[in-house]
Amino acid sequence: MVNIALLGLGTVGTGVVEILNERRNSLKLLTGKDIVIKKILVNNINKKRDVNLREGILTDDFNSIVKDEEIDILIEVTGDLENSYKYITEGINNKKNIVTANKSVVSKYFEEFSQLAAKNNVSFLYESSVAGGIPVIKPLREQIKINDINRIQGILNGTCNYILTRMIEEGKDYGEILKMAQELGYAEADPTDDVEGHDTLRKLRILATLGLQGKITEEDILLYGISNIDKLDIDYIKDMNSTVKLIGEVNLEADKFTAIVQPTIVRRDDYFASVNMAYNSVAFEGNNVGELKFYGAGAGKLPTANAVLTDVLDIIRESNNRENELGHRELINNNKNIIGDYYLRVSYMGEKGLEEIEKLGEEKICKDGSLIILIKETKLKDITNLLNKLKLEKKDYFLARILN
Ligand code: HSE
């Protein structure tokens, strides 16, 4: 028998219980072990739940879980940052294997958890923390052993992709679609984490640090979200026979890396244009294997719970590695040299500023009191320095890279 404790019973936790309830017998045949959820940690044990639970399974006492020697695996799906840090560290120190879907806590304490788990000879697995149901961490863990990874790109947030897809395809209003994404269980408790790009940034930090084998922190990644996108932008992007995606990307050349999350305009025939609604995709490139692309559901109850359970199965079948797989490469941040073609729309901001903005590019269109300018091969730093100098607030402009 394998005893598991589930920490949290929100969307993903409920999915884990549902899948395990349904597949308990087939998993027993497969692994030779009965996988039992012994305890579920919740804040309120009296709250009515929409899932079949054994009498007495709920507890609000973490200590009774972590001190229970019969429990082998903690599945941490609280979504909360500070408590989950305590749960994971105390869990590891008490020789529990850890599976987490919590990208905030993995991103913040990635190195610490990885070291601590290796020291205690337990597993620390986090497949479901990046790109929901898509198996991407495991293939990346495999490939880093025989490849140098020099590029990782991805649509990593289901909520943003759902919003952008429906704005482009159906001309729907931003606020209305965000509300639907929340109802469908895609969005974070605080959806600003999605739309301002923090969630994508955390997932990129995890992928980049593992993939490039050197520490790339949240602060190393430039961040532009989608909350300031306007109908004017959507209409213009459609006229370019393109669509727009929030893409996180890290590139490595020698020891210098660039890392950024930004709205990106992609042509209709580009691969990323075919990734729609709450789907995600991650592409990475290794020096031997070349480019690999992964596609699937980036959010949602069952896909994410499914990824959690693939980690659990790896632990039970002992097919995972208990070494610390993070590398020690000293990488240099080269974000100041990020260069590209950009789309910039600014709301009208007076004659003087307008002149300076106009100098950024040749092609400019004035529409509805706004200026749209297409900027060729320019350093991102020069554009953002000008926006800062002109004291433009975020709500007054939308900047997106144009992928050629
Ligand atoms: N809020 C996240 C998303 C959930 O929309 O992608 C999955 O990590």
Image (tube, grey):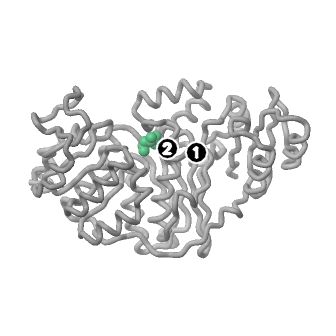
Q: Quadrant of residue 167?
A: top right
Query: In this rendering, is residue 327 above or below 30?
Result: below
* Residue 161 in sight: no
Quadrant of the drawing holding the N terminus: bottom left
Is the CB atom of the residue marked by disc 2 within 8 angstroms of ligand 1's nearest atom? yes
For badge 2, the amino acid type reads Asn
Residue at coordinates 74% horizontally, 44% vertically from top-left? 343
Ligand 1 found in image quarter: top left
For badge 1, the amino acid type reads Leu
| Location of mark 1 (residue) | 246
Give the percent coordinates (x, y) of residue 235.
70, 31
Residue at coordinates 42% horizontally, 63% vertically from top-left? 140
**The label number, if any, that marks residue 157 in the structure image:** 2
In-front residue for pair 34/190 = 190
Is the CB atom of the residue marked by disc 1 within 8 angstroms of ligand 1's nearest atom? no
Q: Quadrant of residue 30?
A: bottom left
Residue at coordinates 77% horizontally, 46% vertically from top-left? 387
Q: Secondary structure at mark 1?
A: strand
Give the percent coordinates (x, y) of residue 357.
84, 45
Query: In this rendering, is residue 45 above or below 328?
Result: above
